[in-house]
Image: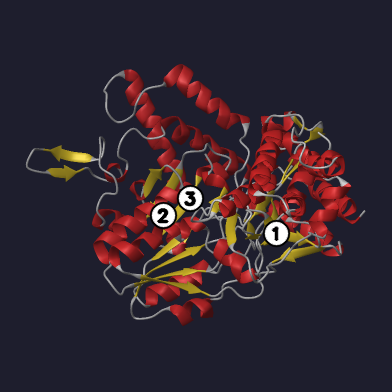
Amino acid sequence: MDLKDLYQEIILDHGKNPRNLGKFENFNKDAKGHNPLCGDKVHVYLKVDENKKISDIKFEGHGCAISMASASIMTELMKDKDEKDVNELIEDFLKMIKDNPDLKSNLISEDDKTKLMSLSGVKKYPMRVKCATLPWHTLISAMTNKPGEVNTEKED
Amino acid sequence: MNIKDIKKEFPIFDNKVHNNDLVYLDSANSSQKPKVVVDRIYDFYTKEFSNVGRSVHYLAVAATNLYENTRVLVQKYINAKDPNEIVFTKGATEAINLVANTFGQKYLKEGDEILITELEHHSNYVPWHYLRKSKGVKINFADVDENGDISIESIEKKITPKTKILAITHLSNVTGAILPIKEIIQLAHSKNIPVLVDGCQGAPHLKLDMQDLDCDFYAISCHKMYGPTGLGVLYAKKKWLEELPPYQGGGGMIGEVKKEGITFGDLPNKYEAGTMATAQVIAFGESINFINKLGIEKIEEHERELTKYGEEILRKNNSVKLIGSPKNKGSVLSFTLDGVHPHDIATILDEDGVAIRAGHHCCQILHEKLGLAATARASLGVYNTKDDLDQLNSSINKCIKIFNS
């Protein structure tokens, strides 16, 4: 195991200075996520327009560098994507964290892929995978208007 | 005490963690096990196994004697008056649930109050919470002060004529505060309030004397005392065990069972329904022998010295903020680091073989009061040394380096 894989510069940067942190007035979808084992919390706010496109996305929350960086990078990549692309990216990311060695989707640039792949370091740290996936499960919940809070201990 | 020799009695330290020596600083969560305890489980299953208290054959009689022998060892360890005041449970959590359930059932009614503190572990809050719904009781919390301490005054302030029981920790698993429980018990008794003490952190580290403390109930977690998992002890004054109803029904706890009705067994069987964690109970006897051989006073002294040393070096480290500076502190060092989340601290420390805990340590009420979502916690056991704490400090510096580079 190598800590450098887990705490890459890009993660430390996004962890310390998360992008799109906060809340905006006219969101029309939102969801909360919680990891009761460690107390990490995330609240994702979305503005989805009439074409089912995410025109704005922000998040509030607190947690470790991994969860904060994951939420930050996620919000950057999801802005201006439509529902179909959002779902494809979420699925691709979750599969990469679980099994796949790489991202398959062609929806994002090579640079963005590199950014997203910086989170792949958690694969060697099973206890930390939930830190990386919590914001993504919360985004799914917001997109699908699922009632209640996402809870890392109640995933199927 | 020669700690190097003591450490050799714990086989876990023969293993490497990420190619490093294990620096185990998570004993408040669960302690490691000496070889004598592990061997005792193996020997019992391979040479002596039988169920206890039922059959009359050779093995059953021998196993029953071994099982009851641990009860006497526990009684003596905590200086209880009678071995029948010792009830084995599946953990301290079950011990507290047993009291909350049976005491609540028999004595509590709507409007009654239970007093606990803001320091309590979830296991000394959640079992009482059920009585809010089932009985309509109210739970009050004595305030923790800025040092992470609970004063006698803070307890006194929350006692009302409706307070029916006080449930309080002996030693906080987050701030390390050792509470003046003897004085608190005296205060509660002067107002006719029985007291349950959560002794999960007290029993492994402090000399106990139930007769001197005069508490009504004392809950013990065996796996925190160099003993097996799946086992706890409830000490309860005999009058309570006689007065309270049984907790669970099943084999072994009955007197006579007829279609028209059932009578219950004598103490302590009344509270030990079903086949108990026999091997664990027998092996726990070895944990007590292990502690007695070293001497709990010596262990206390060693841990106090180490805690002081740990506090000193962590206070000198400008990035570290220690949580809690109680008057009387047990061997728990909770801390935060500027700019590094406790979970990241725990992962980075783990890479060096340093095992700590990060999170809310099952004390969300306290963390909310402290305004912290999580803390990192190093906690000590008899096998720890100053070298372990130096390694902790140097791994903490590594965290700071990674996050501030």
Q: Nearer the viewer, residue A12 or B100?
A: A12
- Distance between mark 2 and mark 3 Cα atoms: 9 Å
Label 1: chain letter:
A
Labels 1, 2: one chain: no
Q: Quadrant of residue B318?
A: bottom right
What residue is shown at x 67% (from left), y 54% (from top)?
A53
Query: x, y (%) of residue A45?
Result: 64, 61
Name the mark on residue A55. 1
Circle 2: residue type: Ile
Q: Nearer the viewer, residue A43 or A49?
A: A49
How is the protein colored in the picture? secondary structure
Q: Secondary structure at mark 3?
A: strand
What residue is shown at x 47% (from left), y 34% (from top)?
B280
Circle 1: residue type: Ser
Q: Which residue is mark 3?
A: B220
- Distance between mark 1 and mark 2 Cα atoms: 52 Å
User: Is residue A151 something one can see in this rendering?
Assistant: yes
Q: Is residue B336 left or right of residue B190?
A: right
Q: Which residue is mark 2?
A: B96
Disc 1 or disc 3, which is closer to the eye? 1
Name the mark on residue B330. none
Q: Give the vertical position of B42 relative to B221 (above or below).
A: above
- Distance between mark 1 and mark 3 Cα atoms: 56 Å
Q: Secondary structure at mark 1?
A: strand
